Amino acid sequence: MNDPVKGLRAARVAETEQRILQAARTLFVRGGYHATTLTAVADHAKVGHRTVYVRFGTKAALLRHVVDVAVAGDTTDRTVAERDWYQAALTGRTLADRIEALVDGTTGLMERAADLFDVVLQAQATEPELAEAFQAGRTATRELLHQFVRNARTDGLLTETTDPAWQEETVALAGQAETYLLLRRTTGWTHEQYRAWLHRTLTQVLTAPPG
């Protein structure tokens, strides 16, 4: 039988963690990495200072956790590769279906996490842990987008091309967080404008005539 006391305790722990993560997100985005302290996060979340230190240890670890939750969209232990939207991008019936799924998923991820990516980029010069984590994210994104293109090619959804590597790298570049941040900074585009650009770019790259 389930222990109701343990269940209640677990629920309280989860609720406290959620408050801490939301407070951290707010303060990191508002004030930047260096101006945000664990003490300030605790005060904003209305929890004890020790609670934040015990749960996360360092400010860099807290920011990593906040970013991970934003990228995933929730606190479950499923990677991006296991998310429904990415699986739909690998297995959709048509190329248009797959592009739509990938664009929807990528745009949603950027909407949730882009401001936090900016904070990480600001902090990485003094926080090797964050620099390493962001590089790992770049690598993982590149691999996921390469797989998206390769699956479409294997399933006969792409026209023949003399340069498949160009397709893979162009799609990978279009989907990187830094591409989104640069576009936002230089154009002032909204999420919807980015979504339209990404959809058009992927469609043109993946349906380009041989050459």
Image: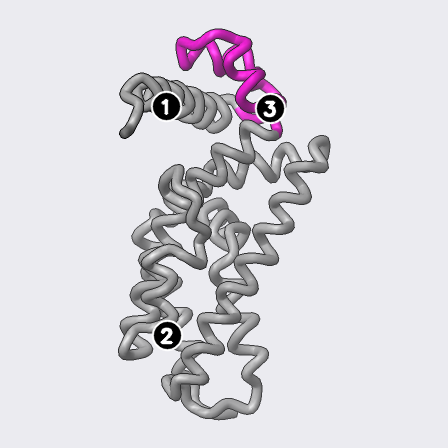
Q: Is residue 42 magenta?
A: yes
Colour approach in the figure: one colour
Q: Nearer the viewer, mark 1 or mark 3?
A: 1
Q: Amino acid at mark 3?
A: Lys
Q: Is residue 24 above or below residue 206?
A: above
Q: Which class describes the residues within 10 Å of circle 1: few (<14), some (14-19), or many (20+)?
A: few
Question: Can residue 150 be found in the magenta stretch?
Answer: no
| Segment tinted magenta in the rendering | 32-60
Residue annotated with mark 2: 203
- Residue receiving disc 3: 59
Query: Toward the viewer: 99 or 148?
Result: 148
Helix or strand or loop: what does disc 1 sit on? Answer: helix
Viewer can see residue 197: no
Which image quadrant is residue 64 in?
top right
Please provide percent x and percent y for residue 104.
Answer: 32, 58
Q: Nearer the viewer, residue 8 or 196?
A: 8
Q: Is residue 5 above or below residue 143?
A: above
> Which badge, 2 or 3, is on the more N-terminal residue?
3
Q: Which mark is residue 10?
A: 1
Foreground residue among 96 and 210: 96
**Foreground disc of the pair 2, 1:** 1
Residue at horizontal 59%, vertical 30%?
Answer: 61
Looking at the image, residue 106 sits to the left or right of residue 181; the answer is left
Q: Quadrant of the N terminus?
A: top left
Q: Provide residue 133's location: percent of width, then percent of height.
A: 62, 44
Q: Does residue 13 lie above or below 44 as drawn?
A: below
Give the residue displayed 52% in from the left and 70% down from the top: 146
